Image (cartoon, rainbow, N blue to C red):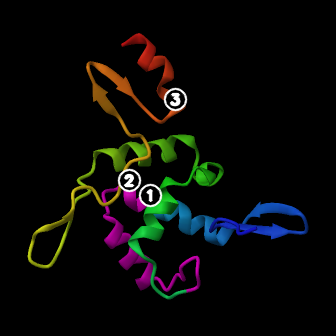
């Protein structure tokens, strides 16, 4: 079993690794302060913090997955986690190549996918079930 970054197995019990948990908290903090995924990667590299795979440089995808992972709620708290999800939903997620052309329409997709079809909102998140019924 592979544990998420910030957790450690002690005997048969999963515990929070405080040093790595501080890194997770700082990633959420920087992101909510407005730092891009790339800026967070640069910050981690400048501080010499190894990636979950042991590489000296994190990837933007690794930081993005960390921010989206619900398993970090015990480390950062529900409010900060939900604030980060809200922030991810509202940021411009278009990635541009060196010439300035968009590579993809939405590189980092939100976990909450809404489709409006004939006035009905469908969603893949159970948190919005009562919202759908009211509309």
Neighbourhood count class around disc 1 (C-alpha, 10 Å): few under 14, some 14–19, many 20 upward? some
**Which numbered dot is residue 71?**
none
- The C terminus - image quarter: top left
- Report, in whole angstroms, how far the alpha carbon at label 1 lies from the one at label 2: 5 Å
Residue 124 belongs to magenta span? no
Q: Nearer the viewer, residue 97 or 23?
A: 97
The residue indicated by pointer 2 is 32
Q: Which residue lies furthest to the top in this view?
A: 134
Residue depicted at x 38% and y 48%: 110
- Of labels 1 and 3, the one closer to you: 3
Label drawn at residue 29:
1
73 is higher (above) or lower (below) than 42: above
Is label 2 in a helix, a strand or a loop?
A: helix
Q: Is 33 covered by the magenta stretch?
A: yes
Horizontal side of residue 38 vs 20, given as left or right: left
Question: Distance from label 3 to label 2 (Cα)?
Answer: 22 Å
| Secondary structure found at label 1 | helix
Circles 1 and 3: CB atoms closer than 8 Å: no
Viewport quadrant of the N terminus: bottom right
Residue at x 34%, y 56% (from the top left corner) = 33
Q: Would residue 128 be found to the left or right of residue 103 on screen?
A: right
Q: Name the residue under label 3.
A: 127
The residue sitting at 47% across, 26% down in the picture is 128
Residue contact at pointers 1 and 2, CB within 8 angstroms: yes
Where are the magenta residues, as a range? 29-54
Rendering coords of residue 26 (x, y %): 49, 64
């Amino acid at each position: 079993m592979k544990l998420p970054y910030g957790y450690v197995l002690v005997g048969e019990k999963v515990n929070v690794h405080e040093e790595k948990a501080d890194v997770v908290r700082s990633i959420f903090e920087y992101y909510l302060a407005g730092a891009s995924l790339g800026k967070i990667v640069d910050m981690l590299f400048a501080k010499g913090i190894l990636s979950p795979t042991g590489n000296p440089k994190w990837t933007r995808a690794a930081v993005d997955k960390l921010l989206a992972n619900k398993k970090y709620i015990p480390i950062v708290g529900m409010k900060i986690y939900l604030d980060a999800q809200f922030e991810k939903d509202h940021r411009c997620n278009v990635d541009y190549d060196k010439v300035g052309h968009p590579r993809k329409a939405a590189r980092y997709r939100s976990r909450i996918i809404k489709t409006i079809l004939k006035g009905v909102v469908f969603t893949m998140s159970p948190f919005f079930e009562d919202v759908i019924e009211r509309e």
